Amino acid sequence: MTQDCPRRDTRRTLFGNFLKANISLIHDSRAAKEGISKNRAKLAEMKEKAPYGIKCGACFSEAFKLFDKEVSLMRFLQVVRNIDGK
């Protein structure tokens, strides 16, 4: 989040809650693929509706990067589970 954003705390909470909800997909591998696509679309929709223009671009860019890292971690953990048979 950019330091000088007037909506920084609100956006941090919003993105934090979004990313936490995304983590729930890790427990259901069948729903994960569809859920990830839906959540990516939801994040894109949030960006479209954001009223703060360019400054929000930096915040959303960071949120998309964190989302992609989270998805990569979920995929890695699913591979490990498949290897371990758990």
Image: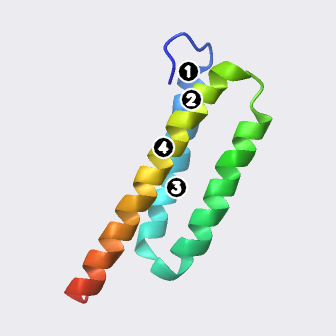
Compared with residue 26, is residue 22 higher up or lower down, i.e. above or below?
above
Q: Residue furthest top?
A: 4
Residue type marked 3? Ala
Answer whether labels 1 and 3 touch (C-beta < 8 Å). no
Foreground label between 2 and 1: 2
Cα distance in 3D space between marks 3 and 2: 18 Å
29 relative to 41 in the view: left or right:
left
Circle 1 residue: 8
Sequence-first tag of 1 and 3: 1
Q: Secondary structure at mark 3?
A: helix
Q: Which residue is mark 3?
A: 21
Amino acid type assigned to the residue bearing label 4 in the image: Lys
Q: Cβ–Cβ below 8 Å for labels 2 and 1?
A: yes
Mark linked to residue 59: 2
Residue 45 location, x and y as percent?
A: 74, 46
Which structural element holds mark 4?
A: helix
In the rendered image of this protein, does residue 84 appear above or below residue 40? Answer: below
Using the numbered discs, state the Cα–Cα distance from disc 4 to disc 3 in whole angstroms: 16 Å
- From mark 2 to mark 4, how far is it between C-alphas? 10 Å
Dot 4 or dot 1: first in sequence order is: 1
